[in-house]
Image (cartoon, rainbow, N blue to C red):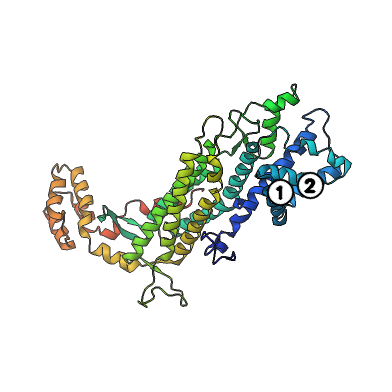
Amino acid sequence: MDRDPLTALSPLDGRYSARTDSLREIFSEYGLIRFRVLTEVRWVQFLAAESAVPGFGPLSPVASQVLDRIAAGFTPKDARRVKEIERRTNHDVKAVEYFIGECLGEDAELGKIRPFLHFACTSEDINNIAYALMLRHGRDDVLLPRLRQVVSLLDTMARNMADLPMLARTHGQPASPTTMGKELANSAWRLKRQLRQLRAVEPLAKLNGAVGNFNAHLAAYPDADWSDISRRFIESLGLVWNPYTTQIEPHDWIAEYCDVLARINTIMLDLCRDAWGYISIGHFRQRRIDTEVGSSTMPHKVNPIDFENAEGNLGIANALLKHFSEKLPVSRWQRDLSDSTVLRNVGVAAGHSLLAIDSLLVGLRKLEPDAASMQAELDDSWQILGEAIQTVMRRFGHADAYEQLKALTRGSSISRDDLQRFLQSVDLPASERSRLLALSPAAYTGDAARLARQAADSEP
């Protein structure tokens, strides 16, 4: 069967391929090979430029330019050549080394580089660096910018709806009012905190040989300070050096990365379900797109499909992310290969996260608050002022205030007149009674409006 979006096994490469395009260069097989080539090239350049090993380097400007072109100009055609070599070697990283050797050709000066390709490296020296670069770029270049769009949109909505009162619900039952802006600000605030944590995750990497002890390095150059060389090389790539590993970098930092991203996804999932619920009860309308169809049989439908799509993709992403954080830090003795196939799926989790983020953005941009719906619900919920009244009564010495309001309001829908008759019978200072008589559910929002604006104006 021909390979095209209609026959793709994964919807990320089929139905949703256009929406995940920004991740392809980073997380695809091509992306992994490209980062491996980059690592191999930068390692040999580092050994030469730093005079790290006697008798090798410095490279001439021409030789350096050739190596730079191999790394910076790496194309899908080059990746296909690597895969051709891999079919012969049955080893993906060794195929990268042979590919670079081919690119050096038969030039005498370039030929002197060939013995130092993949020098003293195990495959995992290259792989762990490649994945660290991959995950860092995926985070910094795609996910974080998209997530900042979500936060920015929520901040704008929180400001615009800061004063818009609505009935809150605890346990699904009417509770003290809030504002729609404050509820959106809650989500924005939670996301901002987690985005700071995601940015703060340090991408760790190692380059220390077959079991983490520089065995081959010291066999070849016993007088070199290989720990220092390794550290400086890792840091030259913008990564953080891990000095203590087995054959593999233990992936603890990847678990941290996945756990933070999963928490971000959980916050967005919570927001999706709340938005879905507010649409359901009429507090939000969705902007109609005339060409769209909501139901194949019910023409009136405008379904909250963007929030539902986001929820589904967040669930898939988190199932993978949680598996990664549990599985990847565990490896038998100095190395087993069970992490290899798992790591190849990090882009799948990123892809479903990205789909969810984009669906959430589309859904949020369609929302229009229905102030009349919210006001009508508040006007029918005078019983929620029982909290305010019993708390003021306590201030003025009524020890049984809670019990009195419980008898009046618990499980009942009462009117404004019912509350006012009650207030007229209570011993309170005239000024306090007047203040409570003037109180309405829509006005009983506490500090919600100020808090919404404050949160929206805070730095992400």
Mark number displayed over residue 30: none
- Mark 2 is on which residue type? Glu
Number of numbered labels in the structure image: 2
Q: Is residue 405 left or right of residue 146?
A: left
Which residue type does callout 1 highlight? Ile
Per the rendering, the mark at residue 85 is 1
- For image coordinates 63% across by 54% down, the residue present is 25
Residue 226 spot, x, y in % from top left: 70, 27
Q: Nearer the viewer, residue 198 or 222?
A: 222
**Relative depth, front residue between 192 and 254:** 254
Q: Is residue 199 above or below residue 161?
A: above
**In which quadrant will I find the N terminus?**
bottom right
Query: Would you say residue 437 is visible in this rendering?
Result: yes
- Please rate how many residues cluster around mark 2, counting C-alpha atoms within 10 Å: few if below 14, some from 14 to 19, many from 20: few
Residue extending furthest right?
108
Q: Position of residue 386 (x, y in %)?
A: 20, 53
Q: Residues within 10 Å of mark 1 (few under 14, many from 20)?
A: some
Image position of 335 with respect to 285: above or below? above
Left or right of residue 76: residue 392: left
Q: Please name the residue that numbered disc 2 is placed on.
A: 102
Q: In the rendered image of this protein, does residue 172 appear above or below residue 60?
A: below
Q: CB of mark 2 within 8 Å of CB of mark 1?
A: yes
Decide if residue 299 is on the left or right side of residue 400: right
Assign a secondary structure to mark 1: helix
Q: Position of residue 318 (x, y in %)?
A: 45, 49
Residue 180 visible in the snapshot = no
Q: Residue furthest front?
A: 88
Mark 2 or 1, nearer chain start: 1
Name the mark nearer the viewer: 2 or 1: 1
**In the rendered view, does 80 fall on the left or right side of 3?**
right
Q: CA distance from mark 2 to mark 1?
A: 10 Å
Quarter of image, res 182: bottom left
